[in-house]
Amino acid sequence: MAFFAKGLLDLGGQLTPLPYPKQDGELVKSGIYSLVRHPIYSGVILAAVSWTIFQMSFSHLLAAGILFVFFDIKASREETWLSHKYPDYPEYREKVKKLIPGLY
C-alpha cells in the first residue's frame, strides 16, 4: 500500500480520475516516480500478491495475475498519451521500470 499512497501523494495536483494526462499537467518523475512509472498500479498489484501469499490460494494468484495483465495493458495505453504530451517521456521510460522496480 506504500506504493499506492506515495504515488497519490507524489502526483499531487496532477492526479486525475481519467486515464490521460491533464491538459495543463506536468510530467512527475520525482519521488516514487523515480523508482517506477505507475506506482499506484504497482501498489494494487503488490497488495493482491501479498494477499495471495497470506491466503495461499491458487484462485487469488489467478486474480493477481489478471490484475497485473489489466494494469500492464492500461499503463501501456496511458504511456502512448504521455509520450505524445511530454517530449521527454520516452527517455524517462528508458530509465524507470513500468510496474515492478528493478524488474519490469
Image (cartoon, rainbow, N blue to C red):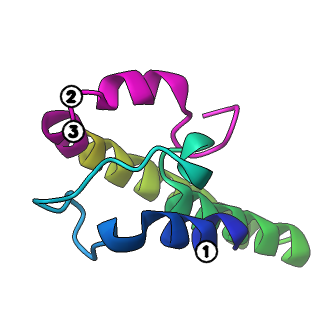
Q: Position of residue 39 (x, y in %)?
A: 55, 57
Q: Residues within 10 Å of mark 3 (few under 14, many from 20)?
A: few
Task: Examine the rendered structure and indicate whether residue 44 appears above or below residue 80.
Answer: below
Is residue 67 shown to the viewer in this render?
no
Q: Quadrant of residue 79?
A: top left
Asked if the stretch drawn in magenta spans residue 97, the answer is yes
Amino acid under disc 2:
Pro
- Disc 2, SS: loop
- Disc 1, SS: helix
Question: Which portion, as a residue range, is magenta?
Answer: 80-104
- What residue is shown at x 80% (from left), y 68% (from top)? 50
- What residue is shown at x 59% (from left), y 57% (from top)? 42
Residue ID for mark 1: 5
Q: Earlier in the sequence, mark 1 or mark 3?
A: 1
- What residue is shown at x 54% (from left), y 32% (from top)? 96
Q: Is residue 7 shown left or right of residue 73?
A: right
Given contact means CB atoms under 8 Å apart, are the residues at marks 1 and 3 in contact?
A: no
Q: Position of residue 82 (x, y in %)?
A: 24, 43
The mark closer to the camera, 3 or 2, is: 2
Q: Observer-nearest residue: 5 or 46?
A: 5
Amino acid under disc 1:
Ala
Residue ID for mark 3: 80
- Disc 3, SS: helix
Q: Label 3, label 2: how many angstroms apart (C-alpha)?
A: 11 Å
Residue ID for mark 2: 87
Asked if the stretch drawn in magenta spans residue 37, the answer is no
